[in-house]
Image (cartoon, rainbow, N blue to C red):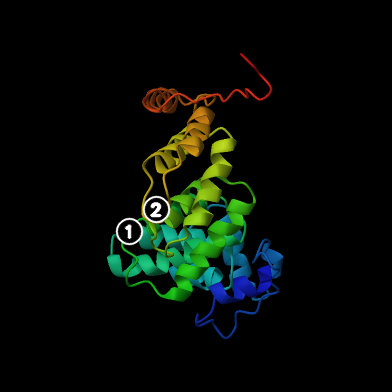
Amino acid sequence: MTPKLTLALLMMGLALPAHAQVSMSEAGIQNSIEVYDPYLRQMRKDMVAGRRIPFDALRALADLGDGLAAFKMGEYLVSTGKPALQDDALHYFSIAAYTGRDFAVSHLLRVLQGDQSETSATRLKGAEDALRLWARRGDAKAVAGLAEMYLAGAPFGPKTEEGLALLEQVATQGNGKAAVELGMLYLKGRPDLPADPKKARAALTLALDSDDLAARAMAENLLRSLAPATTTVSTAGVSE
């Protein structure tokens, strides 16, 4: 799926103002000159300058794919504390993240930690696509967040193999917490993941090299609980 198509799907179902014409790149609106409507163009300039703009103008810009406006919309919706608006907050944070705003990733993850049982499949897919985009770029928060949700089976459904691959990715990059989590998964096992002491040892050994003191201490304790690795010596050709 191309970036342009994915962004179009993210914005599907939005009622755009009739006057709001835009020349939008595949990454959404990145410059005020891309907004054709003079009023909205000025509103975007004011927003970028840190000035307050009317809510309707902010929403119109967000609905056109302006990542900064979408982020601010998401912040506002979350600040209301109304559960019914969290679905919309997820949508706007997804647009913000997908259009290059890395600071939206942590907010997107925070909303996803709430109850998503009533969230539409389209909006969940948009959120997942935005996180996968940043995971491919190596964003540690996106990788760790996706791994946790895939392994938990919610809200995107169980994706154990993908979750393990993502967890291994951040563990090998020096994330001690991820390495310990991976080690514990292989140590204990679960219905969809057989226990594997060898892989558990390898993951916990990675944690020993991290800068996370708590992760290193936990890894040391868990490694002591594992049976010592055995060494097999060939005796072929040896006589008494």
Q: Which residue is the site of mark 1?
A: 114
Disc 1: CA contacts within 10 A as few (<14), some (14-19) or many (>=20): few
Q: Is residue 225 left or right of residue 60?
A: left
Res 152 quadrant in image? bottom left
Dot 1 lies on which element? loop
107 or 43, which is in the foreground?
107
Residue 176, percent from left and from top: 49, 32
Evaluate whether residue 54 shows in this view: no
Instruction: Give residue 189's position: percent from left, percent from top.
Output: 38, 46
Q: Position of residue 99 (x, y in %)?
A: 61, 61
Report if residue 76 is visible in the image: yes
Residue 108's spot in the image, x, y percent? 45, 56
Farthest bottom residue in view: 18
Which residue matches tag 2? 110
The residue shown at (30%, 70%) is: 84
Do residues under tags 2 and 1 come within 8 Å of each other at their CB atoms?
yes
- 79 shown above or below 218: below
- Quadrant location of the N terminus? bottom right
2 vs 204, nearest the viewer: 204
Under mark 2, the amino acid is: Arg
Instruction: Residue at the far top: name it.
Output: 240
Identify residue type, mark 1: Gly
State how far apart marks 2 and 1 are (Cα).
7 Å
